[in-house]
Image: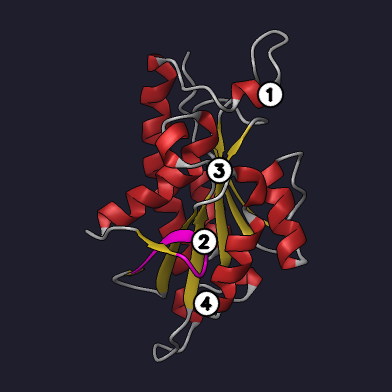
Amino acid sequence: MTPASDRDPTDDRRVLVVGLGNPESDYGGTRHNVGADTVRLLARRHHRDLDRNKRIGAETVEVTLSAGPRLALVVPSTFMNASGGPVQAATRWYDVDPADVVVVHDELDLPVGRMRVKQGGGHGGHNGLKDIDRALGTRDYGRVRIGIGRPPGRQPARDHVLKRFPPRDREVVDVVIEHAADAVEALATDGLEPTQNHYNALDLEPR
């Protein structure tokens, strides 16, 4: 992703920011929905509401940063494992290349209190990413990964991600989501490496 400072100021480019989750009515506040929570927070920061776009199959809104490109915020209306169709439709609707897509999602392999920013890479078994890879035909898009931790004991991962956080973890995750929203804006304005250097060191793990 090219830093905004390196772009022609007349360039009318967008960054497509996708927050993954399951339908909010039934799954709001669950571990699997932290990506959607982040994108909803970004919309609120800019005093905008996400509206249903039936052609995309998602809730969408555009916001303008004080420095940098516009952000097209997208929360698919589908279940997690069918995220690819809305993301592909959104890239066409907003005329955005996959390299300028940022997907915000939950990450089992990171503990609560951690986040990571990266470009490209594998899906790690994440069904939302797997479907986006298939739909876009590439893995070369940005990710902001929010740690939700591994399930305790022998609890299946599919059950763990659909549960809500205990109060102590919820407090930490809410702070991490604020940082994740900051990281999205930093990716758009400053580029990948400076954003990684700042946010990949974040450590708010409950002790």
Q: Residue at x 52, y 30 (%)?
A: 31
Give the spatial CA distance, label 4 vs label 1: 34 Å
Instruction: Tell me the mark number nearer the camera, choosing from 3 and 4.
Output: 4
Q: How packed is label 3: few (under 14 Cα within 10 Å), some, or many (20 or more)?
A: some
The amino acid marked with disc number 1 is Ala
* Percent coordinates x, y for residue 7 in the rendering: 48, 84
Q: Is residue 107 above or below residue 188?
A: above
Instruction: Tell me the mark number nearer the camera, choosing from 1 and 2.
Output: 2
Query: Is label 1 in contact with label 2 (beta carbons under 8 Å)?
Result: no
Give the spatial CA distance, label 1 vs label 3: 24 Å
The amino acid marked with disc number 4 is Trp
State left or right for residue 66 relative to residue 133: left
Which disc number belongs to residue 103?
A: none
Q: Give the residues drawn in magenta, as a range.
A: 54-62
Q: Is residue 9 above or below residue 57?
A: below
Q: How packed is label 1: few (under 14 Cα within 10 Å), some, or many (20 or more)?
A: few
Residue that numbered label 2 is attached to: 57
Image quarter where the N terminus lies is bottom right
Give the spatial CA distance, label 1 vs label 2: 27 Å
Instruction: Tell me the mark number nearer the camera, choosing from 4 and 1.
Output: 4
Of the residues under marks 3 and 4, which one precedes in the sequence? 4
Give the spatial CA distance, label 2 vs label 3: 32 Å
Residue that numbered label 3 is attached to: 200
Q: Residue at x 76, y 65 (%)?
A: 138
Q: Residue at x 77, y 59 (%)?
A: 134
Residue that numbered label 1 is attached to: 157
